[in-house]
Structure formats: C-alpha cells, structure tokens
Amino acid sequence: MTAPPIPVPRRRGLQIYATDPMSGRRSSFRVVVDIPNEPDLAPGPAGELVEVIDYDGSQDCYYEAIALNDPSLLMTNGLAPNDADPRFHQQMVYAVASKVIESARRALGRPITFRRSAKLPKLKLIPHAFYGANAFFDRRLNAVLFGYFQASATQPGANLPGQMVFTCLSHDIIAHEVSHAIIHRLRPYFIEPTNPDVLAFHEAFSDLVALFQRYTYRDILREQIRTSSARLRSVEFLTDLAPQFGYASGMREALRSAVRAEPDPTALSKAHGPHARGAVLMAAVFDGFFRTYERRVADLLRLSGAGDAQRNAMLDPDLVERIANEVATLADYVLRMCFRAFDYLPPVDVTFGDFLRALVTADYEVNPKDPTELRFNIIEAFRVRGIYADVASLAEEALLLRLPDELDPPRLPESILPDLAQLFVTTASALDETARPEPKEVRTRKRTPRGPTSLASYERQVGESFASEDSFGSDTSVGMEPDDEDETLWDDSSRKQFQEDKSRQRGIAQALQDYGQQNFMVLGLANPYASAPIAVRGFSPVYRIGVDQRLIVELVVQYVQTDRNRDWGGVNPRAATTVVFDARGYVRHIIAKPLPGASVDPLYASAAGEREERTARHIEELDLRDPRMAFPDADYERSRMQARADLRALHGGGH
C-alpha cells in the first residue's frame, strides 16, 4: 500500500527582533514571526514577491546569501537573532516584509504583487545598500534600500557610543519602507505633493502599519499588559517607532511616537512638513484605537476588581490573556480597516479628510452597526486634532461616501461581464490558501517564474500598476509582453494561458476606458475629445467578508486625466476618479478629484476650483520655505515639485 504524500506546510516561522537590537538584548523581545511558506524559496531569500540582494554599496561586495530551506534552518525557525551576521539581516528583512505584505493582501481582498516588467518582477530588499542613517523605497529601482551608520558618540542612548547600527534590523523601518512600496503600488500618484497632506499620508500610513504589526506578537503583548496594568497608552513598545534609530541618531528618544503629541485642534495648522503632519494623522488613528480598546476592556477590568482603584495591582494571568486577545483582535481590525480604505481613496491629491471618509466607508461596508463605536471614536480623534472632511457635519451618515442623487451612472456594458467573471475567478484562485502546492516535479521543471501559476495569471489579467505615461490598453501595458521573456521555455499550455490572460486584460482595459470616455461628466472628468484623454491607471477585483458573513465582491477602477498643457513645477495637473463597481457592473461609489474646465459637470465645479486654489497655495508655501528658491536656477525651478517627490530626500531629513 502506497502512503499518501506528506503535505507541504502552508506556514513557517522565522526568528526576528520584535523591535531592534537595542531592545532585542532582552530574550523576550526576540520572537518567531509566522509567515506563508514558500516551498521553492531560493537563497537570498528570493521568493515569489520579494527578493533579498545583499550587496554592500560601501564595501563593494556581496554577502553570502542565506538558504532558509536548508533542513537545519527549517528545524530552528531560521537563524537566531545576531546583529553581526549578514545572513540574519537577510532573514529579518524577508520575514518582516512577508508579514506586512500578507497583512495587506488579507485586508484588501486581493493579491499584492510588485511586478513592473520582466527586469523588475519583484520587490528587491537590499539590507546593506549604503553607509548612512537612512532607508528608503526607490520606485525606479522597485527596491527598498537600507543603510547602516555609527551611533552617536555623545548621545547614543542604550547603544554603545559609535557602534554600528543597521536599519535593516529595525522591525519598524522594514515595515515602514515596505508599506511605502505597497502604497506606491496601490496609488502611484500619491508621491506627487499637490497638497500638504499627500506625502504626510505616505509617512503616517507607513508608521501605522509598522506599529500595528507589533500587536501581533502575543508573548510581548501579554508582558506589556501585565506590567502596565493594561494602561497601553503608556507602553513604549506599543507606541514608539524605531527606538534604536532615534537614540543612536542622538535624538534622546524614539524616532516617532503615536502618543507624543497631545490632542490640539490647531495641530495641523502648526505642523509643517510630511513627518510633522503625518504624526498628527498617526496620533488620530491610534487615539481612536485606544478609546475603543478602553471601552472594550472596561467591563473586564471592573468585573475582575482591577478598576481605577486597583490599576497598579498585578493582573490575573487569565485576565491578561483575555485582554491580550481583545487588543490583538482590535489592532488587526484597525489595520485592515486602514488598508481597505485605499479602495475608497481618489487616485491623486489625497487629503486627511479623504482618508477619514474612506475609513468610515470601508468599515461601514463590512460592519454597518459598529457596536464598539470604533468609527465614532476615530471621528472624534480626528476632530480633536482639527482633521475634517469636506462634508456638512461629522455625523457618520455625512462622512459615508454615497452617490449623489443627481448622478445616475450607467452600468458597465454586458460585453465586459464574462471577462470580469473570469477575472473574479482568477483572483479567488490566487487568494486560495488551501490550494495544494504543485507537485515537486512541476515546481522544479525548467520553466520561467511566470509559468502556469494562479498568481502569475492574476498579474497578467489585472491592471494594478505603477504609474506610467500609457494606459493599460496601449502596447506598453503593464504585465509581461510577448518579448519580455523567452517563450520557448514554456509548454503549449503555458503559452496558451499567457495569451488568454493578456487578451482578457486588454479587453477589460479597453472596455473600461471606453466607459470612462463616454461617461466623463458623471465621473468628474473633462471631455476627452476636447482636452486630455482619459486613461485607465488601474483595475482590481476585491473580495471581502462582512461581520455578518456577507460576501462583498467589487471592481475598483482608477481613471486619470493628465493636462500636459499646464505644469505645476514639473508635475502636470491631473484630474482623477476612483469608481467602485459591484460584481454585476453597477456603480456603487465615485470618488473624484476634478480640475476646472468648461466641460466638467457643474456638480464638481466648486470642488475643482477649490482644489486648484489649494494646490497653488501649497506650491507657494513650499517655495517660500525652500532655500533653493531664493536664487533658483532654471532647471530646478522648472522641476522643483518632482525634486520634492523623493522619499530618499524626505527620509534623509528624519527617516
């Protein structure tokens, strides 16, 4: 009798620092992170989505790549934390990046990929890219580059004076930079600083992801709850970002904190620069989170006798476990809520008010009743920091994104629905974690990485992409083109599947573009035949499960219209709209960022004028604070807004 094959594990554990080596000197701050298992993980590590390339730019050398599928490492959850071993550095960036990407995928209800072309098929992680106190995502290289530097000789904090500090060993910096890459994948124009909130949103969202990831480490969470008597606002592990980097840089404190700034209705008006404004947004989200947490555990503390009068008493272990479950569940919920909000954001010119409305709408879609008042607490936390949306009131009903009564957008044409149905099936297959891995002989057969896998098929059919100057319907559409790779390595079935996938992508893209061109007024765009063409910059199917077990299936489409006859310091003005369709092709939401124009629907005219004026004021304010504009050369003046859209320079001024 032949025994059944042993199934390939779906998960694997890898050892990491929960924060960084400074706190990681304590054994309790070394944890095993649970991530998806990649049976074909190559040395590097090099997986399906990310690839670690350990080239040291300062020393001009490559370090030996770790092979995490080595049997010895499989038995021990990888290497033990060691800040002197480059192989552990590689393991650390791969593990944290994989965890962040998985969180995004589960929240968004669709796969996350980073493919730009055959030459840039994955997100590269370079642990020792350069010498310097910085780390950043480079959108042109499709890579995250980590630096290393010597700690301050006079104010090193809990580090040795002058010791080498590696940003690739900071859990928060890794998560932050990978989040930048995800944001750029979802909304590539959020790098254009057309208002004060755009780059600040990039920074704040990346900080939120980094900190909320910490709440998944249950053992440390229990310890912090026990030692703080469940007063989590005062727990530095749960509120402070990148402590080693901050202290080693001579700041005498962590790089940033979710609770450092007190609520202040004038906070935004006094905050200048992306990091300062981003800190306000991060504090608002965490304030809403903590308010909800305190409400959810109040009865537990009261019933256990650990109320205000006993707040310094040691908590019962069972109570600690119960509170830890509440905290971890709520943190995961809020993080997913933040990711889901992306599907309700405009493609360009995002504001904090846009994010507030997107948060409320994203959560309402899956949880209409809000029994713990999470949405109310978040709205209040935004209000006390002066973050408002362009609505009639702060009531939840006013903040929810709804189609105006004046709009009656038509349904998508029937001709596109069969292809959309197949696209939804492909997306579900790519999300299916229960699917059995391919047999080893199939996985090791000589073929390209773009062979017949569900994720590769998904990548070829969707239109979620980095920004380019061409729409998806053009000859340079994102995804693999026939000349990207050697098709002779494929069998007939693989070649046929590739051709069907690309044909479906082009057909859907063209139909969506035709829809936008024909319905430009209802979408808040200008007449494409009298001004700029309307491009489809992205389309993605999504699956979500409501708290009442409803299945929510939608198609999110991004339309962008670029005015090449005008210029904002090197950035062309863009009108853009996110449209959310249901599975039958009916419009559920329209989130528009219009520009003034004779053919723009009067319903959008006021918003278009206000947006134009706000952008002009913002550019003027940036120019006044820019010392290079005192005596600018012609090249800088012409492209200054492009120069300001640089994450490397932004992080160099405070990570």
Image (cartoon, helix red, strand yellow):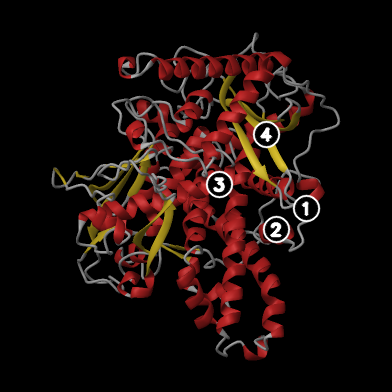
Q: Contact, CB < 8 Å: mark 4 with mark 1?
A: no
* Residue 630, picture quadrant: top left
Tag 1's secondary structure?
loop
Question: Where is residue 263 shown, x and y percent of the image?
Answer: 62, 65
* For residue 190, above or below residue 337: above
Q: Which residue is mark 3?
A: 106
Would you say residue 196 is visible in this rendering?
Answer: no
Q: CA distance from mark 4 to mark 1?
A: 27 Å
Between disc 4 and disc 1, whose residue precedes? 1
> Going by the picture, which residue comes out furthest to the top?
529
Q: CA distance from mark 3 to mark 1?
A: 30 Å
Between disc 3 and disc 1, whose residue precedes? 3
Between disc 2 and disc 4, whose residue precedes? 2
Q: Contact, CB < 8 Å: mark 1 with mark 2?
A: yes
Q: Amino acid at mark 3?
A: Arg
Q: Amino acid at mark 2?
A: Arg
Between disc 2 and disc 3, whose residue precedes? 3
Q: Amino acid at mark 1?
A: Leu
Mark whose residue sits in front, 2 or 3: 3
Q: Which residue is mark 4?
A: 554
Q: Dot 4, crowdedness within 10 Å: few (<14), some or many (≥20)?
A: many
Tag 2's secondary structure?
helix
Between disc 4 and disc 3, whose residue precedes? 3
Q: Which residue is mark 2?
A: 383
Q: Nearer the viewer, residue 40 or 584?
A: 40
Q: Residue at x 59, y 69 (%)?
A: 325
Q: CA distance from mark 2 to mark 3?
A: 29 Å
Relative to residue 594, is residue 191 drawn left or right?
left
Q: CA distance from mark 4 to mark 3?
A: 15 Å
Q: Nearer the viewer, residue 66 or 511?
A: 66
The numbered disc on residue 394 is: 1
